[in-house]
Amino acid sequence: MMGSTTTVNAEPFTDHRLVIIEGIMGSGKSTTMRFIAKRLQEMGQQAPAVHERTDPHPVRATDELEHWFEPWRDVTPVQLQERALAKWAAFVETTQSGATVPVMDGQLFHGDLTNLFLMEAEPALISNYVQTLATVIAPLNPFVLYLWQRDVEQAVQAVCAERGAEWIDYQANWKLAAPYCTRRGFAGLEGLVALYRDYRCTTDTLFEELPFSKLAIENSGRDSPAYEGRILRALQLSG
């Protein structure tokens, strides 16, 4: 990260006023978020890294709910959609008035849209939510990086092996208790794999339909230097 001698530009260094990194759990979102934010900071840009655990979170719509981890207990999909869009609109207004380039871990897909999916929202509602959200954030000229893995089962098993049985139980007890999973009988590690196969099908389509700058990287090879080079070139931060 930058030291005290960093010079901050009066105007954003890049044309993009927002960078979003998306992908399933364990796909490398947080690591990539920190990499991009650090590169921007080294170039003199105010680039806050917005992690999914940032508190208070600028756009997460479930924070004020009683059961924020299980929003289906408190709100309908339509109500969650409305809360999320209002949060994003306020975030865009704040960002436009400053000179920062937030680099965000998920929240376009991984976040409130994931909750809508777990709540078994109608596909039309999910599609409409993302289309409306794309319009809301368009003034920031966002850049979306989509990290994906060709073999979903292998990717889920790999992150579960890395993080251990306690983490698997945590994921299963949370996500597999949601309406989408209970109605399909998803359980255990196999249930998580089935969930993320379905989720990936949805987000693949939504990503293809996004109307602004974007880059998809199949990163199961874990060749970080190659991926980072592609990311910097796409953001015009290389050289």
Image: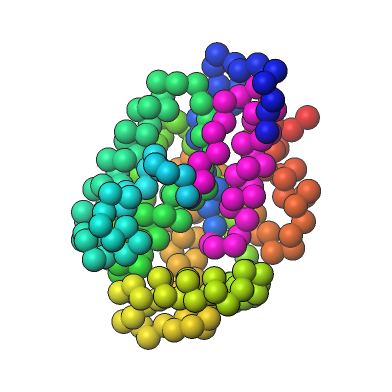
Q: Is residue 170 rendered to the left or right of residue 112?
A: right
Q: Is residue 184 rendered to the left or right of residue 152?
A: left
Residue range corresponding to the magenta coloring: 24-52
Q: Residue at x 37, y 34 (%)?
A: 91
Provide residue 117's location: percent of width, then percent of height: 36, 65
Q: Is residue 210 visible?
A: no
Query: What number of labels is visible?
Result: 0
Determine whether 238 is above or below 21 in the image. Answer: above
Provide residue 72's location: percent of width, then percent of height: 26, 65
Provide residue 204's location: percent of width, then percent of height: 50, 60
Determine whether 149 is above or below 44 in the image. Answer: below
Rendered-image quadrant of the C terminus: top right
Determine whether 118 is above or below 192 in the image. Answer: above
Q: Which quadrant of the figure has residue 229?
A: top right
Q: Residue at x 59, y 62 (%)?
A: 26
Rendered-image quadrant of the N terminus: top right
Q: Is residue 125 rendered to the left or right of residue 226?
A: left
Q: Is residue 110 visible?
A: yes
Does the magenta run of residues contain 33?
yes
Provide residue 34's location: percent of width, then percent of height: 63, 42
Does the magenta run of residues contain 9?
no
Q: Residue at x 45, y 31 (%)?
A: 140
State the residue in front, 169 or 228: 169
State the residue in front, 13 or 134: 13
Q: Residue at x 42, y 75 (%)?
A: 173
